[in-house]
Amino acid sequence: MKSIETIRQQLAQGEFEFSRHAFRRAVERNISEAEIRQAGLSAQLIEDYPTDKYSPSCLLLGFTDEGKILHLQVSRTETNLTKIVTLYEPEPQDWDLSFTQRR
């Protein structure tokens, strides 16, 4: 299973790919590649899904240079690129103040 440090590095270096769903969400939610790379630098694991439907995955919390909060669900499968499963700006009413715990 891919380590969080490897995922963080790959995101920050632009070594990632989108699932079809994630690509649509990035466009709909106006989340740029640069923002994903910035969030990758500070990404921290907040939920782990070792038995996820298609492959082990996890939910990461990261921040852009402008302070935008992003959640990125990524695959933990050992591959050359980190696959982004979905991504979004978390809704404050659904998360605690640190955006790491669901309400």
Image: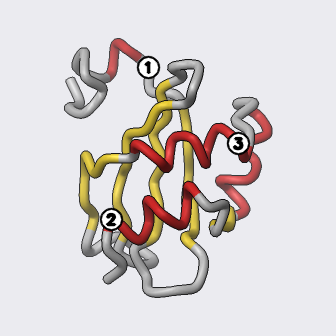
The numbered mark, 2 or 3, whose residue comes first in the sequence reads 2
State the quadrant of the N terminus. Answer: bottom left
Q: Which residue is mark 2?
A: 4
Question: What residue type is disc 2 on?
Answer: Ile
In the rendered structure, the answer to whether residue 5 lies left or right of residue 21 reads left
Q: Are marks 2 and 1 in contact (CB under 8 Å)?
A: no
Residue toward you, 74 or 7: 7
Q: Is residue 42 above or below residue 81?
A: above
- Where residue 33 sits: x, y (%)? 72, 46
Q: Which mark is residue 58?
A: none
Which numbered circle lies on residue 91?
A: 1
Looking at marks 1 and 3 on the same chain, the residue that comes earlier in the sequence is marked by 3
Label 3: which secondary element: helix
Structure colour scheme: secondary structure
Image location (x, y in percent) of residue 92:
37, 14
Q: Quadrant of residue 10?
A: bottom right
**Residue that carries the numbered disc 3 in the rendered image:** 34
SS at badge 2: helix
